[in-house]
Each structure stands twice: as structure tokens, then as C-alpha cells.
Image (cartoon, rainbow, N blue to C red):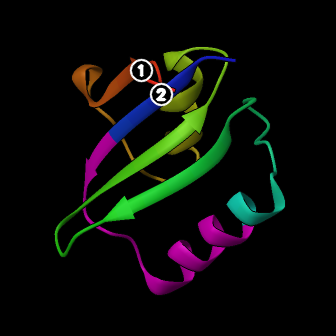
Amino acid sequence: MPLFLDHHKGVGSPSQREQATTAIKAGMKSPQGVKGLNGFYSTTESWCLTEAPNAKSVHDYHESMGINLGASDVTEIKTLV
């Protein structure tokens, strides 16, 4: 399954971060086929590492949570190891 890293402004509410943490720990897949692997955040922005069928799925997944990503905010990545 392809890996994606996305970037968006904002860090979400504590309840949104808790919901994401729970889903990642449980290995849950969204209805769009997106599985969160990890998330990272600073005081002003966030990054999500996911497995997904394609970039559109990542966009659709975020939009279902009210987060609109730009075309350049989702990047397919490869691992070194």
C-alpha cells in the first residue's frame, strides 16, 4: 500500500488529536481506505503519515474531518528501510 505524508495548518483540538491517536493505535482504516500510521504536530501545523490507495483518498479522508488540503499538501513517499 502506498505511503503518504500530508501537511496542514493548525493542530486540531485535543479531542481531534485523541480521536486520531485512538484510530492509529487500533490500526483502523477509514471508509476511504486510509490507515493512519502516525501524526506529528507543532504549535501551528500538523503532518500525517498514512497508508492509502492514492492521494485522492487522503484528500477525501481529511475533507471528511473538515480539513481541506491543497494539491501540494499530499506527497507520496518511500521509506529508506
Q: Which mark is residue 4?
A: 2
Residue 19 placement (x, y as % from top left): 65, 72
Give the residue at x 72% y 30%.
32
Give the residue at x 54% y 54%.
38
Q: Is residue 65 visible?
A: no
Q: Which residues are magenta?
A: 7-22
The single residue placed furthest to the front in the displayed view is 81
Q: Are marks 2 and 1 in contact (CB under 8 Å)?
A: yes
For marks 2 and 1, give the CA distance. 6 Å
Q: Which badge, 2 or 1, comes first in the chain's sequence?
A: 2
Give the residue at x 60% y 79%.
18
Q: Which mark is residue 77?
A: 1
Residue 16 placement (x, y as % from top left): 53, 73
Give the residue at x 47% y 28%.
4
Residue 3 placement (x, y as % from top left): 54, 25
Dot 2: element: strand
Asked whether residue 11 is drawn in magenta, I would say yes
Under mark 1, the amino acid is Ile
Image-based side of 71 in relation to 48, left or right: left
Dot 1: element: strand
